[in-house]
Image: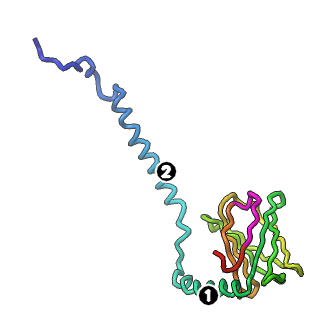
Amino acid sequence: MSHLSPFADRDSGPWYRHRWPWLLMVGPGWVLAAGAVMGWQAASRPDALVVDDYYQQGKAINQDLRRDRAAAARAIVVELDYDVAGNRLLGVVSAGGQPLTGLMRLLLVHSTDPARDIPVTVSAGPEGRFAADVPALAATRWLVQLESGARDWRVSSEWKNPAASQRLRIVAGNK
């Protein structure tokens, strides 16, 4: 009587004819495929958050803070609406309850892609009202900045999904 393994009849044929080795390779195979896709994305899309002139931008932070404090001292308030059908921004700007007039720079900063930032020059009329045609805004988070034409004050706030017809109210000094 020979001593045979209970699995002796199943061990016939080469390994690649059995399903278990292939099932065990599915998980690592998916990991390798996902790693290749992520590696391709990392190599094809450079990091937009790294800047060459970090020292100059660091020095500019103090200037930006002065403009924010100047806006707070003037009690500047901005109200924005986004007309989805017409792709227009409608706004009202005031300082201490009185309308502000003149040329201003409005900047919509996309949350992840600097190529999608939208700079617009607006002219506020006698009642502080302005309108600006803009491309269709993606349903994402935007940073909205409005500054005077002379760049002596600036207000900014985050706008979550303007396409959802939310009104944005920016009060200088409230972050």
* Residue found at the very far top of the displayed protein: 1
Circles 1, 2 touching at the beta carbon (< 8 Å) = no
**For the N terminus, which image quadrant?**
top left
Residue 126 x %, y %: 89, 81
**For the C terminus, which image quadrant?**
bottom right
Left or right placement of residue 157 versus residue 5 in this view: right
Residue highlighted by disc 2: 37
Left or right placement of residue 31 versus residue 122 in this view: left
Residue highlighted by disc 1: 63
Q: Is residue 72 above or below residue 20?
A: below
Residue 33 x %, y %: 45, 46
At x 70%, y 70%, the residue is: 108
Residue 144 x %, y %: 69, 71
Quadrant in the picture for residue 25: top left
Q: Is residue 157 above or below residue 27?
A: below
At x 80%, y 67%, the residue is: 89
Q: How many marks?
A: 2
Q: Nearer the viewer, residue 118 or 16?
A: 118
The magenta stretch is 161-169
Mark 1 or mark 2, earlier in chain: 2
